[in-house]
Amino acid sequence: MTTHDRPTHTTAEAFNWALRLATRMTARSLNMPEPLLHHTGAFVFAHVAAAERRAVKTLCPFALLRQALARRRKS
């Protein structure tokens, strides 16, 4: 009976390795330390998420309906 060698790395480990490599290469290309790059990305993500939340509140169908009805009642 022969035993076949199984790959020692899982897909998750390969993904983590690729993510670390991409982070390191991006940090080097921007001439930034890796932790600063990570925190800057988190900061930008938070701002984009906040802007999206504001946009959703503005474009909410119920809010638009309430605004339209309020304008209609005024005139």
Image (cartoon, rainbow, N blue to C red):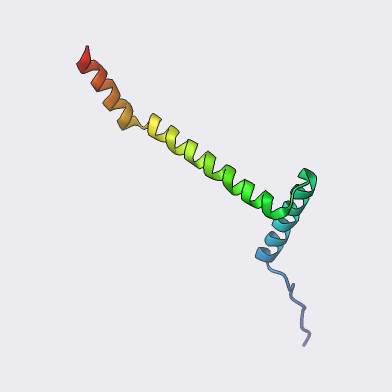
Residue 71 coordinates in the image, percent (x, y): 26, 17
Asked if residue 50 lies left or right of residue 68, the reply is: right
Residue 26 on image: x %, y %: 75, 47
Quarter of the image where one finds residue 66: top left
- The residue located at (58%, 42%) in the rendering is 44
Q: Quadrant of residue 69?
A: top left
Q: Is residue 12 left or right of residue 75?
A: right
> Is 45 on the left or on the right of 34, as rendered?
left
Residue drawn at point x = 53 percent, y = 44 percent: 46
Residue positioned most to the left: 73
Identify whether 74 is placed above or below 37: above
Q: Quadrant of the N terminus?
A: bottom right
Which residue occupies 74% across, 75% down? 6
Residue lying furthest top? 75
Quarter occupied by residue 67: top left
Q: From the image, which quarter does the C terminus lie in?
A: top left
Query: Which of 36/60 is in front?
Result: 36
**Which residue is pictured at 48% across the width and 37% down the height?**
52
Q: What x and y, as percent, mark residue 40?
A: 63, 46
Q: Position of residue 61 (x, y in %)?
A: 34, 30
Q: Is residue 61 left or right of residue 32?
A: left
